[in-house]
Image (tube, rainbow, N blue to C red):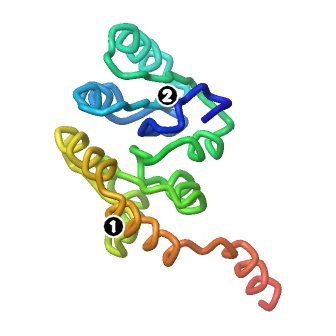
Amino acid sequence: RKKMNIAPDVFVTLLLSGGNGVGPMLEILKALEKASFPLVAIAVCGHNNGLFLEIERFRKQASIQIINMAFVDNVDELMSCADVYIGKAGGISSSEGLAKELPCIFVNPIPGQERANADHLTGVGACLEIRDVSQILGIVSALRSSDDKMAVLKKNIKETRRPGAASEIADIAEKL
């Protein structure tokens, strides 16, 4: 947070939209703007220049601090700054969130792999899901105001994640 000039006592949301910058990121930011507590939103737009420009216009008049970014290669650092991740339920983002023990809120997972990831991770209580952007502020507010809710999510993340999975897979492949 120091590197990003973010105060240590503010709630930070990280919005990721994948490399192609998909999803309702601007709508989520507009919903988060109604927060009644100090909030910083880090928005990563990927390669979607149109989305980046839309958010940049909104950022200039927004009542919350928005850090607007295009494609980045430091998602791990951004996740270290964040209290919660909001966005896609893709394999990489989900895995990175679990590795960082970062509670995730998935937004409208697409059928297939994202749907399966969301179903599994919400099923074990490690992540949350919304189907409508109007739900986001209530969930973020509840997480911010409840250490117990955050602790349960982080406990479930610890029980679910598999930090040694790559080594386990390599061992199995070697034996085969």
Disc number for residue 156: none
- Tell me what residue is drawn at x 50 percent, y 33 percent: 20
Where residue 158 sits in the image (x, y, percent)? Answer: 52, 72
The CA distance from mark 1 to mark 2 is 25 Å
> What kind of residue is marked 2?
Cys
> What kind of residue is marked 1?
Thr
- Tell me what residue is drawn at x 55 percent, y 29 percent: 6
For this rendering, which residue is in front, 53 or 15?
Answer: 15
Task: In the rendered view, tell whether residue 68 sits above or below residue 84.
Answer: above
Q: Are marks 1 and 2 in contact (CB under 8 Å)?
A: no
- Tell me what residue is drawn at x 44 percent, y 13 percent: 56
Where residue 9 sits in the image (x, y, percent)? Answer: 47, 38
Which quadrant of the structure image shows residue 167? bottom right
Which quadrant of the structure image shows residue 89? bottom left
Q: Please state, as top left, top right, bottom left or bottom right, where the N terminus lies in the image.
A: top right
Residues packed near mark 2 inside 10 Å, few (<14), some (14 to 19) or many (20 plus): many
Which quadrant of the structure image shows residue 31? top left
Residues packed near mark 1 inside 10 Å, few (<14), some (14 to 19) or many (20 plus): some
Residue hosting label 2: 45
User: Of the residues under marks 1 and 2, which one precedes in the sequence?
Assistant: 2
In the image, farthest residue toward the front: 9
For this rendering, which residue is in front, 176 or 69?
Answer: 69
Task: In the rendered view, tell whether residue 170 sits above or below residue 111.
Answer: below
User: Tag 1's secondary structure?
Assistant: helix
- Tell me what residue is drawn at x 31 percent, y 17 percent: 63
Disc number for residue 122: 1
Where residue 45 sits in the image (x, y, percent)? Answer: 49, 28
